Image: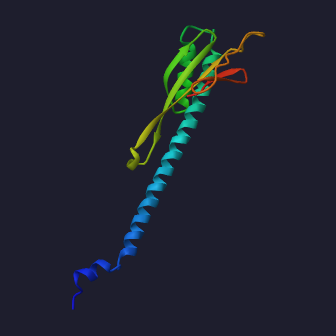
Amino acid sequence: MTPGPAARLTDERGSGTVLLLVSAGLLLLAVLVALGLGSVTLARHRAQSAADLAALAAADRLGRGPAGEPCRAARQVAAANGVRVESCTEQQESVLVVVTRRARLPRLLGGGLTVRAGARAGREPPPGSARPTRHGAGGYRDVTGRMEFQA
């Protein structure tokens, strides 16, 4: 004898399988998101390190050689560190370098994201001169006599 429609609606056979599949899917999604966040964070830190090194290389060449030499040095250092120089601005006593790096993400999360980082480096200011005091989002902070741009 076949059960009637009311009996089929209250039958719970197979519900554990559905619950297991939904749980496994959510766990997989959580792992993908965690991998994506880790990849973006790692790319951001590598981009910042490369920007710092490129700015220091550029600052080392300030005032020596033809115009554009500091930015050429920044591009060489950035390329050696796997980033692309988005902009390089020579200022009076400092150089501002902004770099980009591609962070790889799982295909389900879009496949990739570009992260940006920047750094400013320059000569040590003369004794008794004022140093920049701007802080906060997008501000500058003093790092052992060098200036770093917070992206």
How many marks are shown on the rendered structure? 0
* Residue 6 located left or right of residue 99: left
Residue 90 in the image: above or below residue 109: above
Residue furthest out toward the right: 127
Residue 32 in the image: above or below residue 93: below
The residue under the point 27% across, 80% down is 8
Residue 115 % position (x, y): 49, 34
Residue 147 % position (x, y): 65, 21
The residue under the point 23% across, 80% down is 5
Residue 84 in the image: above or below residue 60: below
Residue 75 % position (x, y): 53, 22
Residue 1 % position (x, y): 21, 92
* Residue 125 located left or right of residue 101: right
Quadrant housing the C terminus: top right
Seen from the viewer's position, the closer of residues 26 and 87 is 26
Residue furthest out toward the bottom: 1
Seen from the viewer's position, the closer of residues 56 and 129 is 129
Image coloring type? rainbow
Seen from the viewer's position, the closer of residues 74 and 129 is 129
Where residue 146 sits, quadrant-wise, is top right
Residue 54 in the image: above or below residue 5: above
* Residue 1 located left or right of residue 110: left
The residue under the point 55% across, 8% down is 67
The residue under the point 60% across, 32% down is 49
Where residue 94 sits, quadrant-wise, is top right
